[in-house]
Amino acid sequence: MAKILLIDDEASIRAALKEILEYESHEVTALDQADAALKLLHEQNFDLIMSDIKMPKMDGLDFLTQVKSMEIETPVVLITGHGSVETAVDALKKGAFDFLQKPLDLNRVLVTVRNATQAGQLVTETKQLKKKVAKLSGVQMVGESAALKEIDQMINTVAPTDARVLILGPNGSGKELVARQLHERSTRVAGPFVEVNCAAIPGELIESELFGHEKGAFTSAIKQKPGKFELAENGTLFLDEIGDMSLSAQAKVLRALQENKINRVGGEKDIKVNVRVLAATNKDLKLEIAEGRFREDLYHRLSVIVLKVPSLSERLEDIPLLAEYFLGRICEDYGRAKKKLAADAVKLLQKHTWTGNIREFRNVIERLVILGGETISVEDVKKYL
């Protein structure tokens, strides 16, 4: 079943097409004017657009041009009773998926709808795959502030080495992004980037997660399992929230860093590993050491290089660029035309206290994309911030 937007100023044709398509189990929204359809496209997503060419106010070719300028990739099929080879060629050049001529042939209509919706699904799937790949590899840092430029310069200097890096910064500031950039710009980029969130794994399981286990090592160990150190071989292991790791696991990590060897839980054989370790935390590790919750020797092993990621409040001048970046990404994710942010709305965002940093900022932009107007106003920001 496809969600179809149908535009035709002739009520009889509009009603007949709607009936045919709904009989085929499609969901159809039928309108008689192209300008109303453009407004609707800012609010809803469709799998297929079918539009008459000869219409008052705005014709189908102008409508098609507007749709393409909105960066909407939904297939558009144009319909006319005044067709010619020239009109058909012009429509296809402007990006129409296909061209139907009145009087409409039922079989031709259904075949075109099927082909267009399948093509649209393929485009959507391809974009989703590209996004997944981009999330895994094509990470980027957005901004021109002095604080961000300093971090970027440090990454360029440190990344080509095998030095261990401790990344410090508040929650939501982008510590994982810094770690991925260190990997992407390193000589290990062809190897895996393996992330472990130490705060999300129960203390009794963290050692098995990091070092793996042998069959029978504990009740649920029904087969041998390699750990994250082995999976990150020749690549980068990122230990996020390292400050929440148990002391017993810290001792094993320290040995792994000292000797480049690990033991699986329940195993006796040493396994050599070639891994670059990056770690991150939002905690004050020196305070954790003083209170006996973190090993001082591990701290010194991890902190060959210390990178401090600035909070968003330390780089407020980056908010316009960040807003533009997230608007583009989120509108694309939702299949909507890219929205704009009014200048006074941007200024209001710069005055806000972003306790959740980049993570909170992105969530607010997503909320504004969903609930705000075509141009996001200062009133929208006040309402949904």
Image: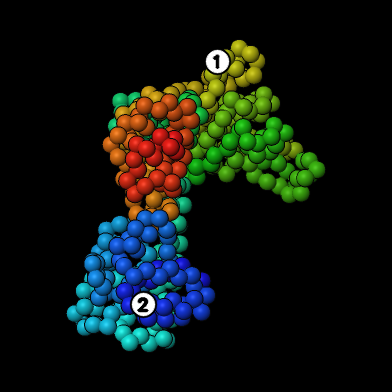
Q: Position of residue 256 (x, y in %)?
A: 60, 30
Residue toward you, 147 or 221: 147
Q: Is residue 264 visible?
A: no
Give the residue number, with chain letter if any, for mark 2. Answer: 11
Sequence-wise, the earlier of marks 1 and 2 is: 2
For label 1, the crowd category at 10 Å Cα-Cα, with few meaning under 14, some 14 to 19 and many 20 or more, is: some
Residue for point 42% across, 60% down: 45
**Quadrant housing residue 53:** bottom left
Q: Amino acid at mark 2?
A: Ala
Q: Is disc 1 placed on a helix, strand or loop? A: helix
Q: Residue at x 77, y 45 (%)?
A: 220
Residue occupying the point 76% across, 45% down? 221
Q: Which mark is residue 286?
A: 1
The type of colouring in the image is rainbow
SS assignment at label 2: helix
Q: Position of residue 139 (x, y in %)?
A: 40, 42
